[in-house]
Each structure stands twice: as structure tokens, then as C-alpha cells.
Amino acid sequence: MGDSNLLYLSRQDVEKVNLPMQRIIERVEAVFVEKGQGRTEMPPKPGIHPGPDAFIHAMPAYVPAMAAAGMKWVSGFPANPAAGLPYISGLLILNDPRTGFPICVMDCTWITAQRTAAASAVAAKHLCRKDAQSLAILACGVQGRSHLEALRLVLGELRQVRAYDIVPAIAEQYCAEAKALGLEAILADNAESAVRGADVIVTSGPILKQPTPVLAQDWVKPGAFLSAVDFDSYLQAQVFTEADLLFTDDLTQFHYYKDAGYFQQTPEPHGDLGQLCAGQATGRSRAEQTTIAVNLGLAIEDMAVSVEIYQKAKELQIGTRLDL
Ligand SMILES: NC(=O)c1ccc[n+]([C@@H]2O[C@H](COP(=O)([O-])OP(=O)(O)OC[C@H]3O[C@@H](n4cnc5c(N)ncnc54)[C@H](O)[C@@H]3O)[C@@H](O)[C@H]2O)c1
């Protein structure tokens, strides 16, 4: 078309917009209200699988209230870190909902890290004890980091982090960063010592189709909240079956994943985050309830966050204009 109407935002450009985590949590919460009210369109993500436990997913969504329409095309390749590459890479395309024209192409890795943690924080608002003080992080990579950033904002009493990673140097670095934030940081030698006694547990290791989970029910303190970012790869089946409340972010996509071979031992969730945020389901009602969020990661979250990044990038004149 030759009118340079397409904006390209690199990873650096997206970070330069610097959307605060507090705002990302608000956007993710708002989009879950829209979803709960039935005002979003989001077909389950089709994917291709070019290697063992590797995926490239197409994630389209439309959120009329946010004038957000588009698709994320995101990959996760477990062998990448050994080759010095990030596990997650990908792009996101935004379309003008009035004409269908692509208006922006942006890197999606920062958004994926931030919105996933924001969804856990939204779940924590409904499912976690308000007086939670200690957080166990099993796998201290990109998600481990963004989860600390987001959960601190919704858990006002948080003061201790217990970090475990199969690569000790990564957990050591993580502890140093947590200390710099004014938190007590405990470097755990193993997953069990990190989890025992923790009020909040985040598992953010690799997602495996045929998992060999180690996190046992008797490690979990009654009343704990768990966010299983890596699906059922860390939590043994009994942890799911014994939980008082199990929520996911989208029931349709949960069933879609189950049909694709994931979650074979996982019971049916009590509901999804759309229902919790729209007031159609009840979250934690007693301190001793053990609760789990197993969020799958939704395109509506990506749209809710990316459309705001696009608007701010235009205001701040960040990015590169391209001809379509
Ligand atoms: N559910 C969602 O919405 C969602 C969204 C994005 C990413 N994810 C998943 O989150 C996970 C982490 O992604 P990331 O970008 O943080 O990856 P990353 O490569 O940055 O971090 C992964 C970390 O896990 C560690 N690790 C591997 N096996 C471990 C184990 N058994 N115990 C402890 N640590 C272990 C690695 O050393 C690494 O530090 C991936 O499985 C990814 O697919 C989920």
C-alpha cells in the first residue's frame, strides 16, 4: 500500500514502552471479566510440533471492548537454552478490527513473560491467602522472574522467597535479585526443601507431554496456593486431586489440551478465571483450603496487553514504520 501504516516493534522497542506490571495485571483482569461475560472470541490454539516437547502455537483472539484483534505465533523449544537461545520466541500481529488490516507486528517474548505472571497474580487475588508470606519458585528462568515481580504486587505480606533451579547458578542469581528487592532469599538444594512450608508455590520448568512429576502432596502446606505454569509437569496427580479448589484460565482450552494428550491424570477444574473475575464463581473462602491455578496462557491476555503497548509506542514514537 506504500503508506507505511504498519508499525514494527522489536523486543527492545516493546521493553522501551515499559508498561508497568501493575497495569498489565489490570489489563489481564479486565480481559478476564470480558471473557466471563462472553464478550471475547478465542478459538483454542492450533499448533505444530517440530521436535520433542517443542511447539509453535497460533493464538488468535478478538476483544471488542479493547478494540484488540490479532494473533500471537509463539514457539517454545526446550533444547534452546543448552544452545544459548531463549526457550520462548515469537511474533504478535495486531489487526485493525474495523478493516482487518495488520497495523502492528511486534516481538512477543516480553509480553508472554509479563502477561503469564499477571494471570497468576489475578488468580492469586481470588485463590491465595491474603497473609501469604513465603513463595517457593521451582525453576528460576524468565517465568520465575516475572512471577516474583507480579505476585509481590498482589501479595502485600510477601517477605520470603525460596528458589530452586536444576542449574544452581541460576537460582543463586535469582536469590541475589530477590535480596536486592528487600526480600529474604533462601537458596534451596532441592525442590522439596523449597516447597515444604511455603504459602505460595510456582512451578515454571519445562512443559512435558509425558511428565514425571516429583512434587508430592505431603510437601504442600495446607492452605497453600499453587500456580502450575508448567501444567502437570511438576505437580503429582494427587496434588491436583486433593486440592480444595482447582481453576484454569479457560475451560475450553483445558479440554483441548486434554484431548491433545496433556493433563491425563488431572481432574476437571472447578471453573476458569473468566468466571472468577466476572463474579460467576467463588474463589477461596477458608484459610485452610489448598488451591491451584493451572493457567494455559491465553491469546486474550496477549491482545489486552499488546494493543496498549501499540498505542503507547505510537504516542512515544517508538518503533519502525513499514510498508505493507
Ligand atoms: N502456562 C502458561 O501460560 C505459560 C506461558 C509461558 C510459558 N510457560 C511455560 O513456562 C515454562 C518456563 O518458561 P521460561 O520462559 O521461564 O523458560 P526458561 O528457559 O527461561 O526457564 C526455565 C528454567 O527451568 C529450569 N529447570 C528446568 N527443569 C527444571 C526442574 N526440573 N526443576 C527446576 N528447574 C528446572 C531451567 O534451568 C531454567 O532456569 C515453560 O515450560 C513454558 O512453556 C507457560
Image (cartoon, rainbow, N blue to C red):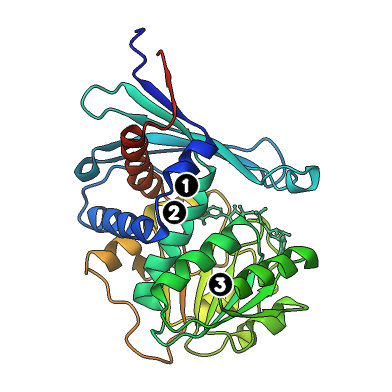
**Element carrying mark 1:** helix
| Residue designated by label 1 | 111
- From the viewer's perspective, is 172 left or right of 253? right
Amino acid of disc 2: Arg
- In this orientation, which residue lies closer to the viewer: 23 or 193? 23
Graded by Cα atoms within 10 Å as few (under 14), some (14 to 19) or many (20 or more), the crowding at tag 3 reads few
**Element carrying mark 3:** loop
Q: Position of residue 182 (x, y in %)?
A: 56, 77
Image disc number at residue 115? 2
Q: Position of residue 48 (x, y in %)?
A: 59, 35
**How far apart in space, not on screen, are marks 3 and 1 (Cα)?**
22 Å
Image disc number at residue 181? 3
The quadrant where ligand 1 appears is bottom right
Q: Residue at x 61, y 71 (%)?
A: 180
Amino acid of disc 1: Ile
Quarter of the image for the N terminus: give it.
Answer: top left
Asked whether the beta carbons under mark 1 and mark 2 sit within 8 Å of each other, the answer is yes
- In this orientation, which residue lies closer to the viewer: 20 or 291? 20
